[in-house]
Amino acid sequence: MGNWVVIAEYYSDVYRTEFICHGQETKEQALKALRAALHTYVPSKNIVEKRRRVYRFADQESYLVVIKGRLSEWECTLRIAELVSDSTDPAVAERAQLDDGAADVADGPQDRIPPGY
């Protein structure tokens, strides 16, 4: 079972990542949720939207959203991501769950629980 999310990444005093949609089981569901969010997502800042422009990146799995407000312009990147330990690709999920310390960083991304927790 996959665990896909839709996230927004932006800079507002500091770099931020905001989860928009959790728990999508497939990449296709996550892409559908992403495309729905392109026209409805608004930042947690108070912006009175006058115009919205959406730019598609070549991978077609991430978009740049530019919102022009009354006084300012705001940009964010919306994209999808998969939790590697729940990946439907068995090789990715297996590598992500190795916890014996024998895995090398080059083996790929891994979820990790720090010692003592």
Image (tube, grey):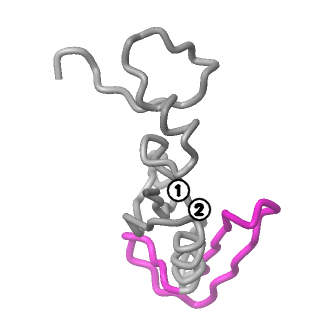
The quadrant of the picture occupied by the C terminus is: top left
Identify the element where label 2 is drawn. strand
- The residue that label 2 is drawn on is 79
Nearer-the-camera pick, 98 or 55: 98
Q: Horizontal placement of 52 versus 84: left or right?
A: right
* Mark 1 crowd level (few <14, some 14–19, many ≥20, 10 Å Cα): some
- The residue that label 1 is drawn on is 9
- Magenta stretch bounds: 40-68
Residue 52 among those drawn in magenta: yes
Q: Which mark is residue 38?
A: none
The location of residue 41, given as percent across then percent down, is 48, 78
Name the residue at 51% across, 29% down.
95
Name the residue at 59% across, 62% down.
79
Q: CA distance from mark 2 to mark 1?
A: 8 Å
The location of residue 2, given as percent across then percent down, is 46, 57
Nearer-the-camera pick, 92 or 56: 92
Q: Horizontal placement of 83 versus 62: left or right?
A: left
Identify the element where label 1 is drawn. strand
Instruction: Check contact, mark 2 vs mark 1: CB within 8 A.
Output: yes
Q: Horizontal placement of 65 versus 86: left or right?
A: right
